[in-house]
Image: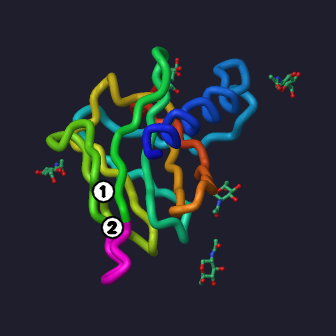
Amino acid sequence: MAAYLLLFTLQLLFGLIRPSLLQNISADLISVSPGANITLLCNITNYSQKSWYQMISAGLRQIISARQSSLNKHFYVDYNVDESHFYLTESSSSVSLVIIGVRETDLGFYYCGGRNDETHIQFGKLIRLNFTGQ
Ligand SMILES: *[C@@H]1O[C@H](CO)[C@@H](O)[C@H](O)[C@H]1NC(C)=O
Ligand SMILES: *[C@@H]1O[C@H](CO)[C@@H](O)[C@H](O)[C@H]1NC(C)=O
Ligand SMILES: *[C@@H]1O[C@H](CO)[C@@H](O)[C@H](O)[C@H]1NC(C)=O
Ligand SMILES: *[C@@H]1O[C@H](CO)[C@@H](O)[C@H](O)[C@H]1NC(C)=O
Ligand SMILES: *[C@@H]1O[C@H](CO)[C@@H](O)[C@H](O)[C@H]1NC(C)=O
């Protein structure tokens, strides 16, 4: 079921966000110096599962995902593509993505997604990460 949902999510995303459409989708530009740490805010709340995705030329990759505990309401990471490079912080009932030491391969488009145990999925606003001065 989880695999099916992930596949569905990816199909949905590829269907919705084709590169040709990107130029017309408003994205928040975040500029960062090479090697700095940066925090990307997710404006999706009220979902017990949260994920962050990066759009790269080869497609889409999931960076990190977390699940909210029904007991203490904290989010616990259940997937992280690179623990030495990414982590999550909780802020105002959502989860922000922290990138440690931003490098060239980190540049591009990011967004977060939220899902409850039902199949409803919502995505946050698009963030464009680029180096300062470019
Ligand atoms: C993007 O916006 C431009 C100007 O507003 C419009 O001409 C063009 O058709 C739009 N492209 C897409 C893919 O929506
Ligand atoms: C970036 O974050 C890492 C891990 O939290 C920390 O060790 C490092 O000092 C931070 N670097 C800067 C420039 O803040
Ligand atoms: C997130 O921000 C975008 C752009 O400002 C807005 O359109 C969207 O409604 C926001 N989503 C939520 C859940 O606040
Ligand atoms: C989130 O849930 C709270 C409490 O259930 C509700 O008051 C609030 O409007 C919800 N926010 C969104 C963005 O759905
Ligand atoms: C970063 O800025 C450069 C120079 O303006 C631009 O060519 C490039 O497309 C930008 N990258 C992203 C991911 O926005």
Q: Are marks 2 and 1 in contact (CB under 8 Å)?
A: yes
- Rounded to the nearest angstrom, the CA distance separating label 2 from label 1 is 9 Å
Q: Viewer-proximal residue, 130 or 88?
A: 88
> Whereabouts is ligand 4, in terms of quadrant?
bottom right
Query: Which residue is outermost to the top?
Result: 58
Q: Point out residue 12 in the picture as x, y percentages from the top left corner.
A: 64, 35
Q: Viewer-proximal residue, 1 or 126?
A: 1
Q: Residue at x 28, y 46 (%)?
A: 79
> Which of the 4 quarters of the picture holds residue 90?
bottom left
Q: Point out residue 125 in the picture as x, y percentages from the top left corner.
A: 61, 49
**Residue marked by disc 1:** 88
Residue 123, above or below 110: below
Q: Which residues are magenta?
A: 68-75
131 relative position to 79: left or right: right
**Amino acid under disc 2:** Phe
Badge 2 local density, few (<14 within 10 Å), some, or many (20+)? many
Counting every numbered tag in the picture gives 2
> Which of the 4 quarters of the picture holds residue 75?
bottom left
Asked which secondary structure carries label 2, the reply is strand
Q: Is residue 38 magenta?
A: no
Residue 39, above or below 57: below
Q: Residue at x 28, y 53 (%)?
A: 78
Q: Point out residue 30 in the picture as x, y percentages from the top left corner.
A: 48, 43
Mark 2 sits near ligand 4, with its Cβ under 8 Å away: no
Residue 69, above or below 15: below
**Sequence-first tag of 2 and 1:** 2
**Residue marked by disc 2:** 75
**What number is the disc on residue 25?**
none
Query: Which residue is outermost to the front?
Result: 1
